């Protein structure tokens, strides 16, 4: 019987102050700790309700628009699932089918699609310096449209991955850690190794590792960021992580050895990404559509990557972790040696051991996005949650 | 508090007779004036309800199918928004993914997709003489299917732009004028300049200017259609406009000077379109996929267009209008000089002055389409609207 | 007044035992006769409710995911309609837009899209030996995900056409025959000619004829499968048909003459398909993307097909049937001589005579899929149906 669990989550949720009504959610570190906790608590409450077959639909209609400027499976379906759960109609903006190419400006399109929009989810992670900026440009247009009376309500933008952060991923990861370790307070002092890993591809976004170091350092964790020299993240985000750790009594270090990061770690998150400088060069080449330049850059990077094939999460490295049994995490899909590629981020044996846990990790994303929709679109989310819980209780009596 | 406004709109709506149940909406001039007024009144009522956060959902399920044979952003999202608001599930017929290419006839497909369809929105504006004819062919197939008992109910077709009319645009434009000037009766005697404007593209449909002259001439307005020689509209539509004006005590003229049309105008609508004769030639070339012919035609037309670069809506021409402050309108996106192109339909300064009003103009479309769905799918739309208003009132007490 | 009809269907439905809750529906012959009868009865009840404007929506939210690995119009819209009617949000997995190409395994993707999924409809009919196997692979992954607690509920897979069966088509066909002849018991002893027909294309799936012989032989019918030598179906399915006929006192024969099959037939189903052996060769060529090989195979097959142009359903052959007036069936779209091709499966005159009946045949598919969703997602479908009927009755009083 889940009723006690939901009641307890409801009580927790009511104790946490949030100020997200008709706001955007772009970077986790722009939101106070209480809001982060509220999102996690609400996500868990909604997940429990869904498990018990209890609908938390809160709207009769309204559009949830998604704009995917890069491929996506799990985030796309998580957003669709959350929209369905809340009662919104999913509407994807396919830029190829629209008239955007006809020279229409972002601020115009933002208003044109939003007359009955409630939420706009955006993925834009290809161009360094552009994705997050694009979301803010859309947001400013929506604010203007609302102030001018064009839009009846300010739709909320949810960052579904940009060049800086991947907040729904990082929050889902944190929700999973909270569940796995039995509470956010249990994370204090736990060591998490966010490390680069070898992959036979290049140009993967930096937003996942940035999201992880930007968020996990707020809970007193011992965050070790590891990567080969030259594979650094955006310096401003690294600074935020350092500051967070200092403020919460946690630790933050940057090392150039996967082994060092793994030593004594309770959690490991080995994942490939492109070096910051390479992404900067790539962004310039993409802007001018320099195909030869892009090919040359890819060749150079793959050759450089190949020097670090030893950065694979294998049994030997796992044995360096706390009790030789750190929790392995990945945002999926992982490059698995001998499964999805010849040499990759993780050995087949380690991945298979943690395959189901990575599915559990992913399972929080639809509910994190549901929580963000719930918090940004309802004036009194606590009252609504209470109503849902009370109704379910009365039906089950 | 909007309650008084909605009550008044409800009373107005109840006084207007409509006969749209299970019918199509293809051309505004096929519908009596009372029906046009009812659509505008209902659209405004639904817009007010949405502003106040009151759902006007009227169905538990059912498909709203859209068929876009040309690109679209605002109409696509307006249709999606209206479907969501009414409670319909949006389903787009992507002709590339379907088996239509396998030689399936229109009448068969029309029935196959319609077993649970309520509304079918169609955009087909590329081929002169084809778009409206296609909608009627679909409609005949649906009528046959209903009469033969194949379909339980006749779905309604809503014209989302064809070669002849763009009724949801023209109605949204009229709703905006009604709002802006404070009532339909206030439009009597007002001069509107529907004029061609220069654009560095060619082949734009004629349906917007045709829709405007076909509708605005029914309200006693002074409609001035202006275009360079050789840029005429479909003659039959021009005749309808002339007849409408005569019947309502309004005026209708065709002039070959943007300045003449602007003189004393209360409203200006400068917008590019392709000459009727060019569209006819283009249609023939498209039918046989004559790429060389199309290229040659484009070159010829662009060269011809270039003779009329002075047909730009700039400050000097705006100063010719009534009190130098006519309302500028555009269906968007506009070709804005120095913004979206080097030389275009409107100067950046004039456009920027009226940018927000054009957004307001566009904001009526989702509610016009909502009204068309409401009127075509509900046997007693007045009773339903009354129910929605009463329920909202009881909840707010 | 339909109330009596629905009451009678409700009573019938309650008398039939089903065990489909949270199960898949892949092949009709894997399900006991009572379950097949229950699906038909429920489909008819839901169709009657829809005709009378009564909603049978049963869910507030949840995803109905479709995966189309081949083109589709009527099945795509039938699935969308059923999802809408039940209250599910439609979400299509477009494999091109997803990260599946990045080496992600089926079992991972199956779980990633399913956290809030209720039904997954799959069409995969291109590769012999692959489509049904793919569905089972997805199903195993979902079962594992559910057992491991990753998924809250096991989503149900509905086969929307594979290499072996096309169960929603065969069930819709059977529902139509039940209606046309006045009951399933009336089908006993009726002769149905499932015959190959000439088409100017090649490579059409075998699943429709296989679905028909696998299902119709379970109702004591006299099933005659006719095709030119070398155009055999999958031997295992032919064996199942033979066994079914023996068990129900029906007949099953394979002949090499359209005329023989038509003789005395009450129903004819002339439809082209590729020979089993050709599909096997084609599958191998598709696997290695051997374009030259595929072209050569197509040429060879079309040449071979051309020997059998006399396999057209024309008036002369129809005159061989029972009372010269067998019911003509087709899954649509048909290759109609002089309409959709020069020489095809059926003469224009015969097709036109039966055009509306083929539409009626197709009209059952959205309700068959609705019934499958109803039965696989509701623990007590009979109670729910009763609730829907009672509510409708109380509203109409």
Image (cartoon, coloured by chain):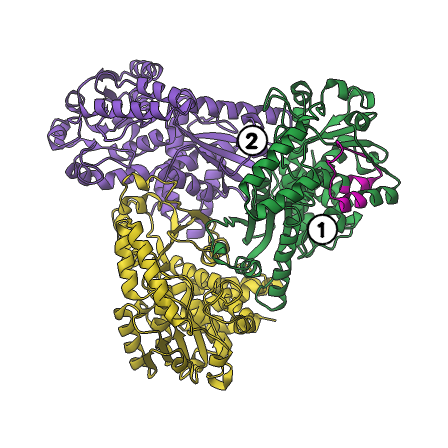
Chain colours: A yellow, B purple, C green
Q: Secondary structure at mark 1?
A: helix
Whether residue C231 appears in magenta in the rendering, the answer is: yes
Image disc number at residue C382: 1
- Can you give x and y, in whole percent of width and height, for residue A189 in the image? 40, 84
Residue C348: x and y, percent? 65, 20
> Would residue A259 be found to the left or right of residue C265 on screen?
left
Residue occupying the point 63% across, 30% down: C302
**Is residue B191 visible in this depiction of the protein?**
no
Residue drawn 49% across the image and 63% down it? A341
The quadrant in which the C terminus of chain C is found is top right
Q: In front: mark 2 or mark 1?
A: 2
Residue A104 location in percent, x, y?
A: 28, 41
Callout 2: residue from which chain? Answer: B
Q: Quadrant of residue A302?
A: bottom left
Residue beneath disc 2: B102
Q: Chain of mark 1?
A: C
**Other residues around mark 1 within 10 Å, as few (<14) / some (14–19) / many (≥20):** many
- Look at the image and tell me whether residue A240 can be seen: yes
Task: Please indicate whether residue B391 sits to the left or right of residue C226 in the image.
Answer: left
Q: Quadrant of residue C141?
A: bottom right
Quarter of the image with the N terminus of chain C is top right
User: Element type at marker 2?
Assistant: helix
Q: Which residues are magenta?
A: C214-240
Q: Is C193 covered by the magenta stretch?
A: no
Please tell me if label 2 and label 1 are on a single chain.
Answer: no
Residue A355 to residue B322: above or below: below
Closest to the observer: C74 or C238? C238
Residue B255 disc label: none
| Residue at the image position 38 percent from the left and 31 percent from the top | B168
Q: Nearer the viewer, residue B149 or A56?
A: B149
Q: Along the line of sight, which residue is nearer the eye, A16 or A40? A: A40
């Amino acid at each position: 019987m889940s009723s006690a669990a939901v009641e307890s989550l409801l009580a927790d949720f009511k104790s946490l102050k949030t100020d997200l009504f008709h706001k955007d959610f772009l970077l986790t570190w722009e939101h106070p700790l209480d809001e982060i906790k509220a999102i996690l608590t609400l996500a868990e409450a909604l997940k429990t309700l869904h498990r018990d077959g209890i609908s938390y639909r809160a709207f009769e209609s309204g559009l949830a628009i998604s704009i995917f400027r890069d491929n996506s499976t799990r985030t796309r379906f998580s957003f669709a699932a959350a929209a369905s759960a809340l009662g919104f109609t999913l509407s994807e903006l396919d830029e190829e089918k629209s008239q955007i190419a006809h020279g229409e400006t972002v601020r115009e399109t933002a208003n044109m699609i939003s007359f009955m929009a409630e939420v706009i989810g955006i993925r834009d992670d290809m161009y360094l310096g552009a994705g997050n900026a694009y979301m803010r440009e859309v947001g400013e247009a929506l604010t203007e449209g609302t102030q001018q009376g064009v839009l009846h309500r300010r739709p909320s933008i949810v960052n579904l991955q940009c060049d800086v952060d991947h907040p729904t991923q990082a929050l889902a990861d944190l929700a999973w850690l909270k569940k796995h370790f039995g509470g956010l307070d249990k994370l204090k002092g736990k060591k998490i190794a966010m490390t680069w890993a070898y992959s036979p591809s290049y140009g993967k976004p930096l937003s996942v590792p940035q999201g992880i170091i930007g968020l996990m350092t707020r809970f007193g964790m011992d965050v070790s960021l590891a990567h080969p020299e030259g594979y650094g993240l955006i310096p401003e985000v690294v600074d935020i992580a350092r500051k967070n750790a200092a403020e919460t009594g946690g630790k933050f270090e940057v090392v150039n050895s996967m082994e060092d990061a793994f030593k004594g770690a309770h959690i490991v998150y080995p994942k490939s990404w492109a070096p910051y400088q390479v992404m900067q060069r790539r962004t310039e080449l993409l802007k001018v559509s320099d195909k030869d330049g892009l090919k040359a850059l890819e060749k150079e990077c793959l050759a450089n990557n190949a020097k670090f094939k030893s950065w694979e999460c294998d049994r030997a490295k796992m044995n360096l972790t706390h009790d030789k049994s750190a929790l392995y995490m990945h945002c999926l899909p992982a490059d698995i040696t001998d499964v999805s590629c010849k040499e990759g981020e993780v050995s087949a044996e380690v991945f298979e051991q943690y395959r189901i846990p990575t599915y559990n990790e992913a399972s929080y994303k639809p509910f994190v996005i549901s929580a963000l929709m719930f918090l940004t679109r309802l004036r009194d989310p606590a009252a609504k949650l209470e109503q849902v819980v009370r109704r379910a209780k009365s039906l089950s009596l």
